[in-house]
Amino acid sequence: MIAIIAYDTGNTRNVKKAMDFLSIPNTLSADSGVISNADGLILPGVGAFGKAVEALKERELIPVIKQAAKKGTPILGICLGMQLLFDRSFEFGETAGLGLIPGEVVAIPENLGVKVPHMGWDQNQVTQSDPIANGFDQQSTYFVHSYYVKTQPQYILAESDYGVKIPSIVRNQNVIGMQFHPEKSGRIGLNGLAAFKELVSNGNYSRN
Amino acid sequence: MLAKRIIPCLDVDHGRVKKGVNFVHLTDVGDPVAIAAAYEKQGADELVFLDITATNEKRPAIVDTIEKVAGQVFMPLTVGGGIHSVDDMQRLLKAGADKVAVNSAAVRDPSLISEGAEKFGAQCIVLAIDSKWDPEKQRYTVYVNGGREATDLDVIEWAKQGVAAGAGELMVTSMDKDGTKSGFDIPLYQALTAAVRVPIIASGGCGKISDFNDVFKQTDVDAALAASVFHFGEFTIPDVKAALKQDGVTVR
């Protein structure tokens, strides 16, 4: 069973709808027992970083998610949920994240002649071959964000060029993030969710 | 580089797509789910649902429509028409809409934009504007109530105000062009894109494929919306995208 972490954020139900459409067993939950025992976790997220961290804290979910990551449970963060996987964000002041992938979240520079937020369909270039990312190479997905992740190339599987190179798929062993919305990116996006399900079913990604 | 978006617009009345859609064989030409799925297959980048249901008590129909579409079609969905409150927005977003478009109600009470943006994020709030050129005053005037009533607002000024209040996108319909099939209102979008930095959806006037090339080559709009040309199969979204691609416009 894959648990979609429910913590008062916008797109949880659309992620659930996509999983249901794919007939992937899933549950929306904020219960620490359910989350601890899940075979895989999805951390959705729309909105501001600080508020999201607060909502996770209120539900006492931060240690639960960290523990699950440590024991090797595959985790997929989507959009803001991906950003939460990193060390810290500078959106409305500095806020600590989950620290599951090294890196930080910074604003997309406004002086590049691009509009911010980065909103719409943009293309992905795969930078490291990986079953999670390969289906997205040269494919467009739906992005909506004003902040992006700065991290080491070793954690970047795919990126999108928006004046700056925006990491669009990241991975640190069992912890995966997608900056775009796979649940809003048509068949290509659904394939990405299905690839995550495959990893949950087959993978053993325990950390050493 | 973001792809320029091509957006079909569906008029929904009591949960049914008005006049229907005939570009492919559908057993039910008014079924929003079947139509949305057909457009997804064509490569539409987003769908706009305009709720034209006249009476307030029937409003839940659109929520139900969005709930159903969002369970079968996985692309950005925008809903407009009859949104008067943050509660209206919340119901639609919860049902699966990604953005809500406000029009007349925002003119009456601009705080609707800021309250919505604060609660759901600016990217959720689209300000829809109906524009008509006033030759006497030499400016574009904002119209409300489905284009029936003029206001004293200048379109460019209202656009700036709306963005300052938190609108993340503008969907601007040229009433001068709407229904004429003579092309998008190029000067209007040139003025708008020079005035604000948020994405703009051009709407009204599209009659042929090259109208899309013109609006994307001559203005900095991010998206173009059309209804009848797509619904009646005069040409398809792949036709439009092929023509744009040939012209060097980035499309998905």
Image (tube, coloured by chain):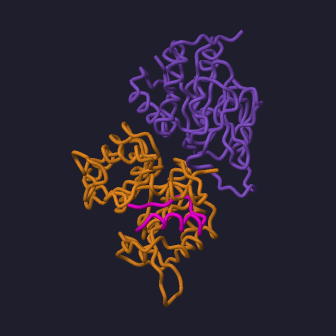
B74 to B17, vertically: above or below: above
> For residue A126, which quarter of the picture?
top right
Residue A94, horizontal then vertical, whole percent: 74, 39
The answer to whether A161 appears left or right of A186 in the picture is right
**Residue at the image position 39 percent from the left and 51 percent from the top:** B88
Residue A68, horizontal then vertical, whole percent: 60, 15
A8 to B232, vertically: above or below: above
**Residue at the image position 35 percent from the left and 45 percent from the top:** B38
Q: Residue furthest front?
A: B246
The answer to whether A165 appears left or right of A132 in the picture is right
Q: Residue furthest bottom?
A: B136
The answer to whether B139 appears left or right of B204 in the picture is right
A10 within the magenta span: no
Of residues B221 and B232, which is closer to you in this image? B232
The answer to whether B71 appears left or right of B216 in the picture is left
Residue B87, horizontal then vertical, whole percent: 41, 49
Of residues A52 and A186, which is closer to you in this image? A186
Q: Which residues are magenta?
A: B207-227
**Which image quarter holds the C terminus of chain A?**
top right
**Residue at the image position 45 percent from the left and 57 percent from the top:** B101
Of residues B69 and B155, which is closer to you in this image? B69
Residue B162, horizontal then vertical, whole percent: 55, 64
Q: What chain is colored purple?
A: A
**Residue at the image position 54 percent from the left and 48 percent from the top:** B252
B223 within the magenta span: yes
Number of disc labels:
0
B58 to B177, vertically: above or below: above
Q: What chain is colored orange?
A: B
